[in-house]
Image (cartoon, rainbow, N blue to C red):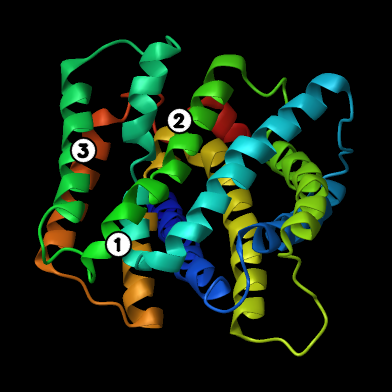
Amino acid sequence: MRERWFLLGCLVVMGAGWGATLPLSKIAVSGDYRHVGVIFWQLLIGAVAMGAIQFARGRKLRLDRRALGIFVLIACIGTLFPNAASFEALLKLPACLFSILISMVPILAFPVALVMRNENFAWLRVFGLGMGLVGVILIVGPDASLPERAMVVFVPLALIAPSFYALEGNIVAKWGTDGMDGIEVLFGASFFGAILAFPLTLMTGTFINPLPPWGAPDFAIALSSILHVTVYAAYVWLVGRAGPIFAAQVAYLVTGFGVFWSMLVLGERYSIWVWFAMVVILSGVFLVQPRLREPLAETAETRQS
């Protein structure tokens, strides 16, 4: 019982940390900083942190052609493309709404999984997909849901990120990562993603000078990058310790804490329609999740971790 409470506490801390990265991302683009410039420093900081973890584990980064292909693919569809859209959406939308819409990943992943034949058709999960769409309609439909009606046009932009994450998850599920674990993949993707992003910052004029003086956006970039890497490493550990079903529940906490931190840090306030939309979307996420059969903290792999 004590072990279960400890793991539950880890889950809550992870959700709080990941949720905090959402309002921090909004702060990062609150001044003159823009998408690719922010992404470059996030990737570079993440690569340094993950590289330190890899070094501590005594493992080298694979550089064969197959590994490089995986790193570049994950960097593009898991960070560069979705984050560029996310930062543009966060310029116009409240961080709370983005926190709710980002939870659409499992819902959007289901139709992709059907097309890629990763999952079988199930009416209950189709109903969950429908609830997710209803939740989005509740956000864009009622006059009182958005602070300004002009924000409606940016909601599809906010859905680009979860769409890419849904695609990324299905690609990994279908073809795997060639034996590399999550930390190694994230290290390689962050390292090569930073290499890809650097010339883009120069081409787009979005390069961020790292020299002081530093302001709130600079600290937000550094803190969100460190939080993301730390929590992701903890997530990989928790999957091995408690199993994928238990660890996956962090998605609900990320959304809840994302809304909480947005209210606390940014002072955002929302209408009843937004709260209703969050309940509907998270209910849809619950229904659309695949029902795996791994028992909590009972597998041989878990006991050896």
- At label 1, the amino acid type is Met
Locate residue 113: give its quadrant.
top left
Label 1: how many residues lie within 10 Å, few (<14), some (14-19) or many (20+)?
some
Query: Is residue 297 visible in this depiction of the protein?
Result: no
Marks 1/2: CA–CA distance = 47 Å
| Callout in the foreground (1, 2) | 1
Residue 260 at what x, y percent from top left?
A: 32, 71
Establish if 92 lies above or below 55: below
Residue sitting at 61 percent across and 65 percent down?
34
Which badge, 2 or 3, comes first in the chain's sequence?
Answer: 3
Mark 2: which secondary structure?
A: loop
Q: Position of residue 296 (x, y in %)?
A: 40, 34
- Nearer to us of marks 2 and 3 is 3
Total label count? 3
Residue name at image x 61 percent, y 16 percent: 175
| SS at badge 3 | helix
Residue underneath mark 2: 298
Which of the two discs, 1 and 2, labels the residue nearer the N terminus? 1
The kind of residue tagged 3 is Leu
Question: Which residue bears the numbered disc 3?
Answer: 133
Q: Is residue 174 left or right of residue 159?
A: right
Identify the mark at residue 151; answer none if there is no mark: 1
Name the amino acid, label 2: Glu
Nearer-N-terminus badge (3/1): 3
Task: Answer with left or right where residue 144 lies relative to residue 47.
Answer: left
Which secondary structure, mark 1?
helix
Which of 47 and 298 lies nearest the eye of the viewer? 47
**Observer-nearest residue: 48 or 25?**
25
